[in-house]
Image (cartoon, rainbow, N blue to C red):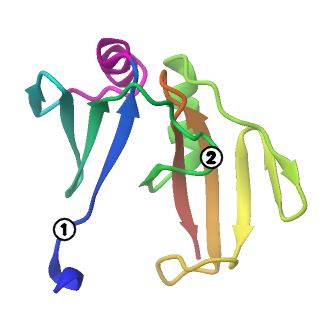
Amino acid sequence: MLKDSDVSTRLPAQDLMRARQFYSSKLGLEPVEERPGGLRYKCGNGYFTLFQSAGSASGLHTQMGWEVGDIEATVRELRQRGVTFEEYDFPGLKTVNGIARIEGNYPSKAGAGEKGAWFRDSEGNLLGIGQTVL
């Protein structure tokens, strides 16, 4: 039943217009659908929605991520747009210039692991970028 269904993500936004500005100016994304309580975006073959919420984002784990072909170039471009990347130094996860190499601790597309980078949107949602390491 669900295995053949599309998956999408929903992210809370306390200030929908502030979030729209962030996704437009920092990430270069424009909504494909707008309603009073939310904005819907298309990236690749998937969708995500920002919805008006009085609650706050947990910001404690990756809430959404993009798979990219060149993480270094993507991080560089996003930094030029004003995105600030998280820096981590935990056992098993250390970033260097905002990018961590994650060796096989979770599945990736036929690779040996992944490179990852994380940043927060204007609403505190923790977003990730990943690149498969072959």
Image quadrant assignment for residue 114: bottom right
Front-most of 94 and 127?
A: 127
| Residue at left offset 65%, top offset 32% | 85
Indicate the position of residue 5 as horizontal and vertical percent values.
16, 74
Tag 2: residue type? Ala
Indicate the position of residue 74 as horizontal and vertical percent values.
50, 40
Whether residue 5 sits left or right of residue 73 in the image: it is: left
Indicate the position of residue 9 as horizontal and vertical percent values.
32, 52
From this view, report whether residue 80 is shown above or below residue 51: above
| Label 2–label 1 contact, CB within 8 A | no
Whether residue 33 sits left or right of residue 7 in the image: it is: left
Mark 2 or mark 1, which has the lower sequence index? Answer: 1
Indicate the position of residue 81 as horizontal and vertical percent values.
49, 18
Q: Is residue 8 magenta?
A: no
Disc 2 element:
strand
Image quadrant assignment for residue 15: top left
Main structural element of the magenta stretch: helix, strand or loop?
helix
Whether residue 1 sits left or right of residue 67 in the image: it is: left
Residue wearing tag 1: 6
Q: Is residue 23 magenta?
A: yes
Image quadrant assignment for residue 96: top right
Residue wearing tag 2: 117
| Residue at left offset 62%, top offset 54% | 116
Q: Which residues are magenta?
A: 15-30
